[in-house]
Image (cartoon, helix red, strand yellow):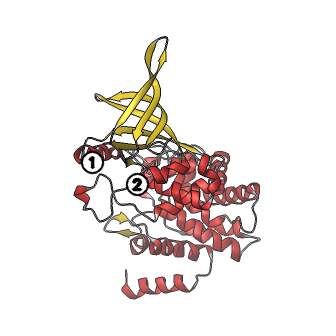
Amino acid sequence: MSLNIHRFAAIKGRQSGDDFYTVVCEMATIPRLFLFNEATIPTELRAQRHINKSRIPEIAKYIVDNPKNYIFSALTASIDGKINFKPLKINGKDSEVGELEISGDARLMINDGQHRRAAIEKALQDNPSLSNETIAVVFFRDKGLKKSQQMFSDLNRHAIRPATSIARLYDHRDPVAEVIRRVVYETEVFKGVVEMERSTIAERSSKLFPFSGIYSASKNLIDFEKNKKIEDQVKLVSAFWETVGQNMDQWKGVRTGNQSATEVRRDYIHTHVIILQAIGVAGKDLINQFPSNWKTKFKNLHKVNWLKNDPEWHKRVIINGRVVKNTNSIILASNLIKKALGVRLNTKEKALESKIKKNGK
């Protein structure tokens, strides 16, 4: 790459009648090569969204913390300036492989990947040794603001964030996910009743819980600061949910084929993620307060009326016929479970209980 011309080995392709070029850039060149729209330019005159600065440290940390196994998808950019593609001749004919020359005064603007670009810059500051790492860039000719805005719209229109369940399931960097994967695969209570891909369960599904719900509920039980052994965490979490399951008649009924998962989800609240989380919260305090006999305490789960039409749930987690998930509703659901299990409430939990009694709700 000279002072006046940017040169890249490139592969030429074609989409909707226009040529595009795929190149590989060193990380160190990315911050210098690409420009963003000025933040002061109105949205309707820009070709991309404003940078969400809160996202940058998280993405940069991902690169810095995983220098041997991170992965970044290609950036997409427009070239506003002169370009020249010199094809490599193969068997005497021009090929789609060659060298792309971009004039040094050309304006290169990212259409998709501006957060990745900013994160690369931040990561290089934290770990300069990443400068020789590379990333693919797909270049299109700039055809004006309208075309650039349409490119941004088209590239992002069908970008769907993966469901939390499958994202957790496939995350092998998260030790909590590793524990929950094993718990779900190895324990009887979850056999055949966990939706592994979606975070919501279809109306006629034979599943009871989403993987993401078990993950969020079980996080309350896992403490890697005190004990970092995966095996010990799996043993604890497995024992916890097995014990819970032994005292949930409807869960057993679905596993044995005596009850319909659809009907259980419709009529009972204990399959909702918020209740799984509440059980996890209550369980953590149960284990802390009764470390030697916490399992026997779970027989008292039979004292809880899990039917959705029970007035207690309408005081705590059901508003206008819908289950509401927020911090207070999780605590209030947990309070009800703690009372059945004989677990002491803390100051905040007692205060929320007092409000319920005071309001008569």
Find residue 252 and name its label: none
- Above or below residue 38? Residue 96 is above
Image quadrant for the C terminus? bottom left
Q: Can residue 253 be seen in this view?
A: no
Query: Can you tell which quarter of the image residue 174 is in?
Result: bottom right
Pick the front one: 61 or 348: 61
Query: Can you tell which quarter of the image residue 215 is in?
Result: bottom right
Pick the front one: 24 or 3: 3
Residue on which disc 2 sits: 266
> Alpha carbon of mark 2 to alpha carbon of mark 1: how far?
45 Å
Image coordinates for residue 11, horizontal then vertical, percent = 45, 29
249 relative position to 86: left or right:
right
- Above or below residue 60? Residue 327 is below
Pointer 2 and pointer 1: residues touching (CB < 8 Å)?
A: no
Give amino acid for label 2: Arg
All told, the count of numbered labels is: 2
Image coordinates for residue 67, horizontal then vertical, percent = 64, 50
Q: For the residue labelled by badge 2, is the local secondary structure a helix, a strand or a loop?
A: helix
Pick the front one: 301 or 119: 119
User: Reading the chain from its start, which is encountered first: label 2 or label 1?
Assistant: 1
- Above or below residue 59? Residue 109 is above
Q: Is residue 206 visible?
A: yes
Give neighbour class at mark 2: few <14, some 14-19, many 20+ (Cα, 10 Å): few
What residue lies at 59% left-to-right and 66% top-to-bottom?
280
Residue on which disc 1 sits: 149
What residue lies at 62% left-to-right and 51% top-to-bottom?
130
107 relative position to 329: left or right:
left
Image coordinates for residue 184, horizontal then vertical, percent = 62, 49
